[in-house]
Amino acid sequence: MTVMQHTAHGSRALIDFSPQATSLEVRDFGLRYGDKTALSNLTLRVPRHRVTAFIGPSGCGKSTLLRALNRLHDLNETVTREGSIHLEGQDIHASSMVVAELRRRVGMVFQVPNPFPMSIYDNVAFGLRLQGHLPKRQVDDVVEWALQSAALWDEVKDRLRASAWSLSGGQQQRLVIARTLAVGPEVLLLDEPASALDPISSLKVEELIRNLKSTLTLVLVTHNMQQAARVSDYTAFLQDGELVEYGPTDTLFTNPRLARTENYITGRMA
């Protein structure tokens, strides 16, 4: 069930997930770049082991919200925020939260694949080695597991020492996902992960997203309405930095509560 409460300062959406079923909770969250408001009074819960999509027009704040979930705005001195974001009940901005550990737990994959200039194997092992010295056999096992989880193992198992840059764009994106999975995240943030890929590679990434939700919470930003409808369980529609509507994807796409949502989904609003 979706409960919407519209206020003068924005909107909030509470889907009735129990605390045990909630991975991330955004509470009255706002973010500004200097004098420019990017997000205003957002409240929503992201369910565990589901795919939640953020949709909305360019500049609506969906990528800003996604990046706030693992504090990627920290290095921007112009950013101010209000409200809070909780991961498994813990405030991610609390003094006890180590940012490096937060970003291990909440991994992120960007629009353009960014493999490191090293071998396929070393890309996946990179984060493991940062965590400390592990026996080579253990690293080997995790690398294989991560590549299998990213549906890439069969394509690269015979050339693990080849450069990651020798892979196709779609393979590079799945390699980046494998690299993120190797360090054991609880949440995977995906910012337009298939928009730079060809249609066949995009479908492979979509299939991967659907498969990963058995073990991970996934949050996806996409401009592609069809993609959001295919892969997500829940969808949040943002406009002008505010949360307009949030609910089960099937319901939001076929029977939206608000005309603003329907106009965007049907293409009557850019």
Image (cartoon, rainbow, N blue to C red):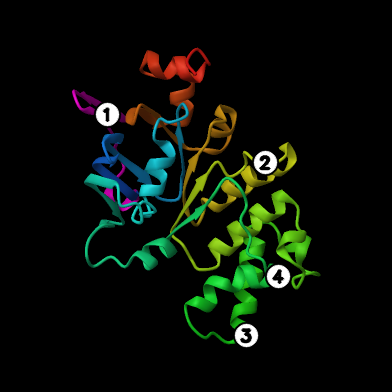
Which residue matches tag 2?
A: 202
Q: Amino acid at mark 3?
A: Lys
Which label's residue is closer to the chain start, 1 or 3? Answer: 1
Residue 42 placement (x, y as % from top left): 28, 36
Query: Mark 1 or mark 2, which is nearer to you?
Result: 2
Image: 202 above or below 56: below
Residue at image location 48% in from the left, 55% down from the top: 216
Q: Residues within 10 Å of mark 1 (few under 14, many from 20)?
A: few
Residue 244 placement (x, y as % from top left): 34, 25
Q: Amino acid at mark 4?
A: Ser
Q: Residues within 10 Å of mark 4 (few under 14, many from 20)?
A: some
Q: Residues within 10 Å of mark 3 (few under 14, many from 20)?
A: few
Which residue matches tag 1?
A: 3
Examine the structure image and report whether residue 7 is included in the region drawn in magenta.
yes
As measured in the structure, the alpha-carbon distance from the residue carrying label 1 to the one carrying label 2 is 33 Å
Give yes or no for contact between labels 2 and 3 (Cβ–Cβ under 8 Å): no
Which label's residue is closer to the chain start, 4 or 2? Answer: 4
**SS for tag 4?**
loop
Which residue matches tag 3?
A: 136
Examine the structure image and report whether residue 74 is included in the region drawn in magenta.
no
Which residue matches tag 4?
A: 119
